[in-house]
Image (cartoon, rainbow, N blue to C red):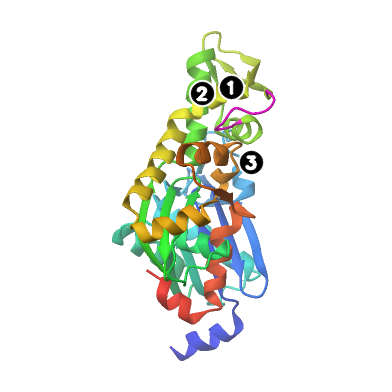
Amino acid sequence: MFINSIMGWFSNDMAIDLGTANTLVYVKGKGIVCNEPSVVAISLKNGKVLAVGSEAKRMLGRTPGGIKTIRPIKDGVISDFDYTGEMLKYFIQRVHNRKSFMRPRIVIGVPSGITQVEQRAVKDAAISSGGRAVYLIEEPVAAAIGTGLPISEPSGNMIVDIGGGTTDVAVISMAGIVYSRSVRIAGNRMDEDIVQYIKRKYNLLVGERTAEEIKINIGSAFPLDEELTMEIKGRNLVEGIPKTLVISDVEIREALSETISKIIEAVRMALEQTPPELSADIVDKGIVLAGGGALLKGLDVFLREETSLPIIIAEDPLTCVALGAGKVLDDEDILEKVMM
């Protein structure tokens, strides 16, 4: 116990947004020091970790038979405990300049629908990776704190956090969640939709990275002012040879329509379940969009059309959860109220 506290004096407490697509690390006093893909490259011969983060993502779909790239976090939860631990250990040691004796306090943002078993898995992974004390905070709460919403006041704040694996919709008042819903439909599902649409319509197989680039460059939820097109490359499934074609934002909007409808449905359900007094606050304040999915072109316009409410995109949607979890480190009172 004494050794732990001594180590604590020398370590920088940190907050981690353990995302399906990206892992962000916030260090007290320094801000966000690490933002890398949640990808691990492993050797199939001995199970050894060969690369983590950006280096591993560059290998996606390009590895020889003896190397495999995996995402140890699927749909917002740990699907591979060992490799999540290895990934966390890599990020923690990297932040502490590989000083393995450092034992920081760690706040981790997790989806609001996480089970007790999944909570235990996240905590165990963080402690085995060098954490001295680990606190879990629900992602929508962390995102709300990160965007500067007054969550401690007795008024309704609604946030929609669209990440890589999950979409979290929450209504927060007095530092607590009044209603929350977590659906395992988000950015990664959109990538899959694009892959399947192009495969079905053009008999062309594109990779996960290409699908993500298409989503970022020409993906949209609402008709744009001018048409966008993009040249893509893939493998023709009929002829078996590489092929290039041009697709438009109209086609990608069609590909994404079902997933976007499910996200809108989750928002509608949250609005239906919100107590009337808090609903009145939401009418005044609107809904805040956070997470990488908030950057999809026209999503705010589409949501405004569907709900007739003001829609605000967070200043930096990708870092909201990490920043919010980081702010909690500085305020013991808030940490006590919001930790799971």
Q: Helix, strand, or loop for circle 3?
A: loop
Camera-side residue of 340 and 266: 266
Q: Is residue 52 visible?
A: no
Q: Which residue is mark 2?
A: 254
Look at the image and tell me in which quarter the C terminus lies: bottom left
Residue 224 within the magenta-colored segment of the rendering: yes
Horizontal and vertical percent position of residue 314: 60, 54
Q: Distance between the Cα atoms at labels 1 and 3?
A: 29 Å
94 relative to 290 in the view: left or right: right
Circle nearer the N terminus (1, 3): 3
- Residue extending furthest toward the left: 116
Camera-side residue of 80 and 245: 245
Q: Nearer the viewer, mark 1 or mark 3?
A: 1
Q: Distance between the Cα atoms at labels 1 and 2?
A: 6 Å
Would you call the spot at circle 1 few (<14 residues within 10 Å), some (14-19), or many (20 or more)? Answer: some
256 relative to 54 in the view: left or right: left
Horizontal and vertical percent position of residue 183: 38, 45
* The image quarter in which residue 246 lies: top right
Q: Helix, strand, or loop for circle 2?
A: helix
164 relative to 219 in the view: left or right: left
Q: Which residue is mark 3?
A: 58
Residue 330 within the magenta-colored segment of the rendering: no
Q: Which mark is residue 250?
A: 1
Q: For the residue marked with disc 3, what is the amino acid?
A: Arg
Q: Nearer the viewer, mark 2 or mark 3?
A: 2
Q: Are marks 1 and 2 in contact (CB under 8 Å)?
A: yes
